[in-house]
Image: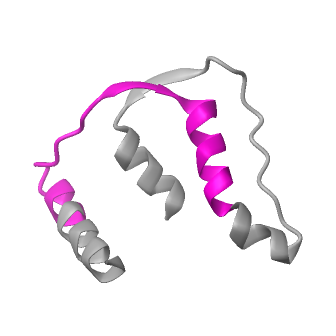
Amino acid sequence: YRLEQLINEFFEITRFNLQTIVLNKEKINLPFMLRQMADEFYPMLTPHGKQVVVNAPDGLTLWGDADKLARVFNN
């Protein structure tokens, strides 16, 4: 599954470079999204004594593509 995902990301980057990528813009609750991502990383960080702290006001929103933004933070 991971290899397939990497290949798809490679092709998406190629499309982006060709300016044909489509952004599915929506209103994103950024603090909520970042906290969800921090929860996903929790099991990898805690054995090393690390943590993620999200310091953002509740209700902070932006317009963007949530999937692609999540990919940016994950990479």
Q: Position of residue 50 (x, y in %)?
A: 84, 66
- Number of numbered discs on residues: 0
Q: Position of residue 72 (x, y in %)?
A: 46, 55
Residue occupying the point 12% across, 56% down: 18
In the displayed structure, 60 sits above or below 3; it is above
Looking at the rendered image, the quarter that the N terminus falls into is bottom left
Q: Position of residue 10 (x, y in %)?
A: 24, 71
Query: Camera-side residue: 18 or 30?
Result: 30
Residue at far bottom of view:
3
Q: Position of residue 42 (x, y in %)?
A: 72, 61
In the displayed structure, 31 sits above or below 4; it is above
Image-based side of 60 in relation to 44, left or right: left
Assess whether residue 15 is covered by the magenta stretch.
yes
The quadrant in which residue 25 appears is top left
Residue occupying the point 34% across, 25% down: 26
Image-based side of 56 in relation to 50, left or right: left
Residue occupying the point 71% across, 68% down: 43
In the displayed structure, 7 sits above or below 72; it is below
Assess whether residue 27 is covered by the magenta stretch.
yes
Residue occupying the point 81% across, 59% down: 51
Q: Which residues are magenta?
A: 13-41
Query: Camera-side residue: 8 or 13?
Result: 8
Image-based side of 75 in relation to 9, left or right: right
Q: How is the image coloured?
A: one colour
Residue at far top of view:
59
